[in-house]
Image (cartoon, grey):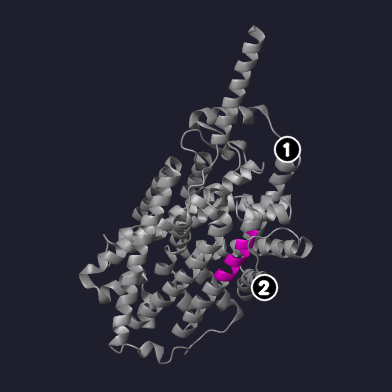
Amino acid sequence: MHQRTKRDSSSSCDENMEHGTQKLQLKRELGLVSAVSLLTGTMIGSGIFMSPQWVLYHMGSPGASLLIWAACGVLAMLGAFSYAELGTVIRESGGEYIYILRNVGTLPAFLNAYTSVIVLRPASIAAISIGFSEYVVAAFYQGCPLPYAAVKCTAAACILVLSIINCLNVRLSASLMNFFTAAKLIALLVITVGGMVFLAKGNTQVFQNAFENTAVGFGPVGVAFYQGLWSYDGWNNLNPVIEELKNPEVSLPRALMISIPLVTCIYLLVNVSYFAVMTPQEFLSSDAVAISWGLKVLGSWTWILSLGAALSTLGSANGVFFSGGRVCYVAAREGHLPNIVSMVHVKRLTPSPALILTSAISLIMIIPSDFTTIVNYTSFTTWLFYGTTIAGLIYMKIKKPDIPRPYKVPIIIPGIVLIAAVYLVLAPIIDSPQLEYLYVVLFILSGVIVYIPVVHYKCSNKCLRSITLYLQQLLEVSPAERND
């Protein structure tokens, strides 16, 4: 009797532990509306308020600039179609990292995680936060140069606030994303309507010789694409969080098909509005094109656009935080990053160690960086990994044609995206070779030095395990199961 009671008690304990383990995983909190908000909210950030003058600068004419914006939208759509197939076949969070791991190999996947965690995601957050801070600080220093310290401190505050929100609650972060998305759409609607009014009054001079002075070089077009695609960056941000998406086989393709055409139309209309109100010279001399537009159209009500731009960039940074933390978390879960980063908070069910690591690196990134430099070098690296991911999809379609595919695209679509990725990687190097691109490549390859002892030979030590245990207790985190 005593032995049976003891056995029953042990069995009950095991069941409770198993039940607890099942609960300790990231919840599927994202429905279709939240998915659309995440994609739209991440894409529409600082880019549409800061990149248009740089696209014009490199292309030389309004007509060519609009063609670049349209082409960027088409490329983002084709890339999204390809990622929809990947996401419905490989239903694991992690985005490019997990797709490269499953289709290409361990070393390329590690290099992607190594680069994304240390550079790409934090740099993206830093650039967006700088854009946010410039619009906020500009409201207090109208017509004056922006204080360097004020811009950097505001950007740091933005990163810290978003980090806390994402660590606290997934649903709170998703709700904020919905709010930010609505706010930015209203701000862009104001710009669109204002531009249409100016066009209706006959302000069409800038479109009469729309393609005059167009740049046609191999390099300028590539760099212009970088600036335009920065505004579309985030079209793939649903794939890294697919384990938290309800009914992913249906929601992922639908969210992509709703979000990207919507954003493309908005971007084209907003750029037309900018050109309807401002001359190319005014356009190029502006530090914040939306504010310059607002001063000419809204006058004293320009603060509406300042607020809209600030909320837009804040929402975009929130989206990058949300997905970027999951990439870090999944890479650690696969053994490619320290084990502590693969854990989730036992009560809040958020990957707080991964988010804290991303925040810390982002804070370092804002110190020396400016917006344009970050865009050029992160875009180069990003499209290098996009190309690797798409090549993996093509390989999977050729070598594994019988895998069940809830969503399937013709092979020509990833083929076009792969060609575009190769062009975007090579164009700036061929047109204007700079040592910085070599430094980027060397940094990526430096990951091999880390990979060999840490991943290949699985080197570990007692001190590292002690630190992991201490951080686990301090942060109240524990290993989690992946979602089915």
Does the magenta portion include 19? no
Q: Secondary structure at mark 1?
A: loop
Q: Quadrant of residue 201?
A: bottom left
Q: Residue at x 58, y 44 (%)?
A: 329
Residue at the far right in the pictured view: 399
Does the magenta portion include 83? yes
Kind of residue indicated by mark 2:
Ile
Q: Is residue 372 visible?
A: yes
- Badge 1 crowding class, 10 Å Cα cut-off, few under 14, some 14 to 19, many 20 or more, is few
Q: Mark 1 highlights which residue?
A: 458
Q: Mark 2 highlights which residue?
A: 419
Kind of residue indicated by mark 1:
Lys
**Residue 443 locus on image (x, y percent):** 64, 54
**Residue 100 locus on image (x, y percent):** 68, 55
Front: mark 1 or 2 = 2
Magenta segment range?
76-86
Q: Main secondary structure of the magenta part?
A: helix
Q: Residue at x 72, y 65 (%)?
A: 394
